[in-house]
Amino acid sequence: MKPADNMLEQKPAVLSTMGERIKAVRLAWKWAQEDMADILRVDQASISFWERDKIKPSGSALLSLAALFRTTVSALENGENFAIPTSPNRGEDSRKSKIIPRGVCLPICEQAGKITIVDFADGGVITQPLSEAMINLGQYSKDNRKIWIVVE
């Protein structure tokens, strides 16, 4: 077993900082910092600063990271129930086949607001906290589904 493989099998508690969690996911996915920066629409230096815990991601960047990692903001920030997700790549070289998803930014409310998503395809309606809605928005975008977003 390679040392890099062994690192991925360690318990989440080993990833004690948000920077360590971000870097562990990026390395597990075999992405360069530039790859992650392109997807998140930030510069490569931001990824470097986040991974070294020099700065924390801003509100919208934090939401984008949580959506990309298919986790909650809370799990990303404090490590509780954090697991390294499977890579969104389909085995192709990510630099050659990368499709940059459309960005989604929602306002951050002082109160614990809810987000309602109406799916045009099936008429389904779900209401969720912001962190959970961001995960679903990423999936809707990936599937090219048309939706309405209602911020309460």
Image (spheres, grey):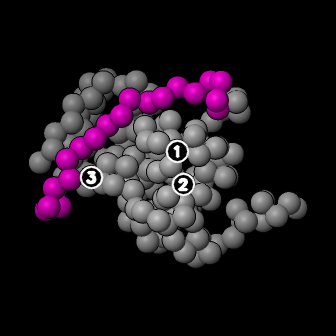
Q: Is residue 151 left or right of residue 126?
A: left
Magenta segment boundaries in residue numbering: 94-112
Residue positioned 73% across, 65% down in the render: 7
The dot on residue 95 is none
Q: Which residue is disc 2 drawn over?
A: 48
Q: Earlier in the sequence, mark 3 or mark 2?
A: 2
Contact between labelled residues 3 and 1, with CB atoms less than 8 Å apart = no
What's the mark number on residue 44? 1
Tell whether label 1 touches label 2 (CB within 8 Å).
Answer: yes
Residue 94 occupies which quadrant of the picture?
Answer: top right
Q: Earlier in the sequence, mark 1 or mark 3?
A: 1
Magenta stretch secondary structure, dominant: loop
- Mark 2, other Cα within 10 Å: few <14 / some 14–19 / many ≥20: some
Amino acid at circle 1: Gln
Amino acid type, label 3: Leu
The type of residue carrying mark 2 is: Ser
Instruction: Name the residue beneath numbered marker 3.
Output: 130
Q: Is residue 122 toward the left or the right of residue 20 in the image?
A: left
